[in-house]
Image: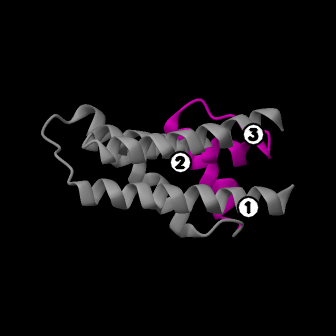
Amino acid sequence: MIELRKHLDRSEDKLKSAHILLENNQITDSIGEAYYSIYHATMAILILKDIHPRTHSGLISEFGLHFVKNGTIEDVYAKILAKAETKRIMADYDVDYQPSPKEAESIIKDAQKFHERIKEAINQLK
């Protein structure tokens, strides 16, 4: 459970960083931090089933298989995860990608919603 707590704490830290970066007009970096907030929240819930994916695609796949497919977590959260990963890749690697502050704000709001839902689910599943 210590590892689970560390991932939840890191998720929260990344969310705070995303807000700070957005406030300082570091749009693409804020998107990356929002994604990593979601990533760490997902890692936390996967730990409940002793699942430790080694890749981002593995994380997405395992989350869908073990928590969305069985109805534990609503499908909208799988979509948030997948969208955030796509936007993070674009923000990190596509030099022509120029997201607006509103787009980044939307991703950060989704990350906050995701973080809260995962914390709720973990508390229910413990």
| Picture quadrant where residue 10 is located | top right
Cα distance, mark 3 to mark 2? 14 Å
Q: Amino acid at mark 3?
A: Arg
Are the residues at dot 1 and dot 3 in contact (C-beta closer than 8 Å)?
no
Q: Is residue 58 magenta?
A: yes
Instruction: State the residue lying farthest toward the right.
Output: 126
Other residues around mark 1 within 10 Å, as few (<14) / some (14–19) / many (≥20): some
In the picture, the disc for residue 49 is none
**Secondary structure of the residue carrying numbered label 1:** helix
Q: Amino acid at mark 1?
A: Ala
How far across and how far down the image is residue 103, in percent?
27, 58
Magenta segment boundaries in residue numbering? 41-70
**Secondary structure of the residue carrying numbered label 3:** helix
In the picture, the disc for residue 38 is 2
Q: Earlier in the sequence, mark 3 or mark 2?
A: 3
Quarter containing the C terminus: bottom right
Q: Is residue 90 left or right of residue 1?
A: left
Q: Residue drawn at (67%, 43%), measured in percent from left and top?
A: 8
Q: Is residue 14 above or below residue 103?
A: above
| Picture quadrant where residue 122 is located | bottom right
According to the picture, the residue beneath numbered tag 3 turns out to be 5
Quarter containing the N terminus: top right
Q: Is residue 87 above or below residue 75?
A: above
